[in-house]
Image (cartoon, grey):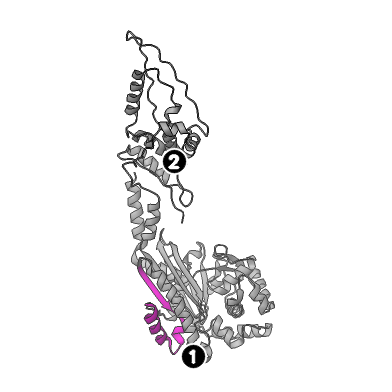
Amino acid sequence: MARGAEGLIVKDPDPDAQASANRGSMHGSGPGARPADAVSSSEGAVSRSARSPAQEPSAPSSKRRRKRKRGRQASGKNGAAGIPSSAALQNGANGSAKPTEPSAKVARAADGSPQPAVKKRRRRSRGGKNGNGALLRSQQNPQPDQQRKVPPVAHPAPSAVQVRLPERLERKASQQPAYAALDLGTNNCRLLVAVPTRSGQFRVVDAFSRIVRLGEGLTATGRLGDAAMTRAVEALKVCADKLATRDIKRARLIATEACRSAANGEEFLDRVKRETGLQLEIIDRETEARLAVSGCGSLVERGTKAVVLFDIGGGSSEIALVDVSGERRPRLARHIVAWTSLPVGVVSLAERFGGRTVTPEIFQAMVADVAGMLDRFDERGKLGALANGPDFHLLGTSGTVTTLAGVHLGLERYDRRRVDGLWLDRANVDAMVAKLVSWDFAERVANPCIGADRADLVLAGCAILEAIRAVWPSERLRVADRGLREGILSELMGDDGAWRRNNTNNTNQRQGTR
């Protein structure tokens, strides 16, 4: 986050000028940025008032010297050489006029009658109009006569040292109570910490994701393996440390299919609580489908009438049929008309059919296996004619569809900003699936959007996707790099009234500044 500019406010300044200085300091451009106008003006005041006696014209008499001394004392309220007055500091903070110079003295004749003032010629120092260069050079390389004539002076700090800095905005954001969502799935452990912003939106302040493969071997044994549990616990310790450093107002920590179906799932969660202090809850499949829809609400545009949203996980795949042809509600999950959870995911399917060596025949066998599960979903036609209309599309939230999007874009490194919300048409998806099926394991590993962690799982995900596309054919697929965690955060903030409070606070702040 960008830090704001530093400013300086003297004691009891003019209110209007102070407000102007504060507004100017709100627009720093990067860490430690300072408003150039305020700095240059104030430094110029110092350089002009800190002129050494060697630069002054010689005085013809002691009387003239005394008058000049009284003039300097009258013009400098701080009483120390090089310290500008309050008015000079205020002018410098506003980036406006130069500090006030002492008025010209009036010479008098012997009989006391006024004589025309003799204009003094002032030597202009190099380094700019305000003489900063000469001042710095004289400070860095003082001449012997200057050392003899100008004793060092301690410069006191201005009386008002506390200022309204833009960093307060950053501190306020960091101190604002946050909301946390943790999703421990069959393949990944993910954490998201965020603070509410505009209505229905939030800003992520911390995140964590690690592939742990908690469901490794679960299909064959029905239990979580020791090595898999250890990997998950180590990842959860990182999450616990992150949560301990934040002021978390509300949090929800969930576990999904691996813990739901494993015989030792509850036993594993007891170990998690002992070793990390985190209390995870196992959610049912309906809740998982609802949270996936809640996390993708902003990707369903106005004008859309129906959506089939799917979340291809590691051990299960959730599918929700969403009808938004009527009046749109704030929460997309309230538009779900049917849902199902298939007991198959990329990890379980790859373990059954193999993930490293996948021939076209094996791939089609995987697609047929998933299609048989979808045939048992009695409500798959609940959208009716809406699923065949032009305002219908698929919405995929999983590592499978984000991987396809990255390969389609030819990314040298995965970039969420380019992937999340991307539209793929039917031809794009067909081409990407065909390309991945044609690659061997080494080629999949070499692709930066797949890598070694997903190379043995991505084709199983593509098989599930192809089975879904066969039941709900659509010309368009939208990619979502979001899911359960975002759904949890949206529901936590909505139930807690966080956005209503933010809107009220913003309104009060705007009224207070008028």
Residue 277 falls inside the magenta stretch: yes
**Residue 32, visible in the rendered structure:** yes
Q: Amino acid at mark 2?
A: Val
Question: Which residue is at 68% across, 79% downward?
Answer: 440
Classify 57 as above or below 470.
Answer: above
As drawn, 285 above or below 181: below
Q: Secondary structure at mark 1?
A: loop
Query: Which contiguous range is marked in magenta?
Result: 249-278
Viewer-side residue, 205 vs 144: 144
- Quadrant, the C terminus: top left
Q: Is residue 235 magenta?
A: no
Looking at the rendered image, the disc whose residue lies closer to the viewer, 2 or 1, is 2
- Residue that label 1 marks: 222
| Along the viewing direction, whichever of 211 and 346 lies nearer the viewer | 211
Q: Secondary structure at mark 2?
A: helix
Q: Disc 2 to disc 1, how far (Cα)?
A: 69 Å
Identify the residue at the far bottom of this view: 221
Residue 37 percent across, percent down from the top left: 45, 39
Residue of label 2: 39
Residue 236 position in % (x across, y down): 44, 76
